[in-house]
Image: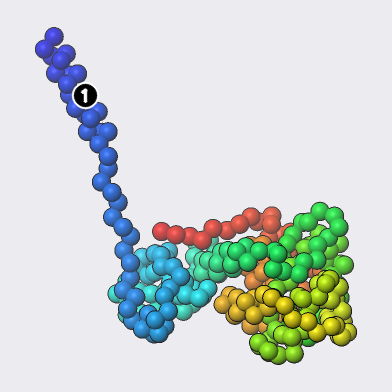
Amino acid sequence: MRKTLLIVAALYSAGTLAADPAPPAAPPKQPDLAKLQAALEGDKPDSVAPSAIPGLYEVVVGGQVLYVSEDGRFAVQGDILDLGSRDNLTDHRRGELRGKAIKALGENNMVVFGPEGPVKHTITVFTDIDCGYCRKMHSQMADYNKEGIKIRYLWFPREGIGSESYKKAVSVWCATDRREAMTKAKRGESIENKTCDNPVQAEYELGQKLGVRGTPSMILESGEMLPGYVPPTQLAQLLAEQKSQGPKATARP
C-alpha cells in the first residue's frame, strides 16, 4: 500500500511539474539602428525583423527593403537569393509590401475598367495620361477585358506635381464620368479642366515609394511589379502561369 501511494505521489508531482507554465520567450534581438537613423536624418523604419541570414536584419524604410548588421555598422542594399529554391526573397518581400499598400489604398481611389464577364485577374497600373505606351495599352482595353483582366488605374504623372499631365489627371478624376474622360484624354482629346478633392498627388507619391520609375507600371496580384507595356494575350498567359504556381512565401528564420 505504501509503495502504491509513493507511485501515485510521484506521478502527481510529475504532472504538476509538466503543467507549470513555460517561462516567457526572450524578445527577439534588435540591431543597433543609431547610425542608420542618423543617415536617414531621423526618419524611422517602418519595420525591423530578422532576415533569412543570421546576424542580418531586414529594415523597411519608406516601402524599400535594406539590410543592417546587428551592430548597426553595415547596411546592405541588394537582394537575398535562396540558392536552394532559387527564390529572390527580397523581391517577394517587396511584393508583399506593394500588395499591402495597394489594398490599403482601396479600389474607390482608382479608375477601374473591368470585364463584363467573370474577372480572372486584377492588375493595378500606375499610368500617365501622355505616356505613349500607356495610351497604347488603354487603346486595347477591350482586349484586356476579353481576357478576363480587370485594370485598375493609379496616377503617376511622370513630370511631377503641377505638370500638364498632372492637371489632366486631376481633370479626369473630377469628371462626371471618369472612365469616359480617361479614354478621351488617352486619345489626346481635350477634356474639361476641373479641380476637386483628388488622390493624384498621394498616388504619385505612393508610386515613388514603391519604386515606380516609369509608366505604365503594373502591380500584379502577387505584388510583383511589371514595368512597361505587355500585350493583352501575353499578359493573360503570364497571369495564368503565375496563378497556377501559387503564392510564394517570404522565408523567415
Above or below for 65 versus 107: below
Residue at x 51% of width, y 69% of height: 90
| Quarter holding residue 138 | bottom right
Above or below for 6 versus 25: above
According to the image, label 1 marks what residue? 12
Residue sticking out furthest to the left = 2
- Badge 1 marks a residue whose secondary structure is helix
Q: The N terminus is located in which quarter?
A: top left
Horizontal and vertical percent for residue 243?
Answer: 69, 57
In the foreground, 102 or 59: 102
Horizontal and vertical percent for residue 35?
Answer: 33, 81
Horizontal and vertical percent for residue 7?
Answer: 17, 19
Circle 1: is it few (<14), some (14-19), or many (20+) Cα within 10 Å?
Answer: few
Above or below for 13 versus 51: above
Above or below for 191 versus 90: below
Residue at x 66% of width, y 88% of height: 160
In the foreground, 88 or 118: 118
Is 191 left or right of 78, judged from the image as shown?
A: right
Residue at x 83% of width, y 60% of height: 115
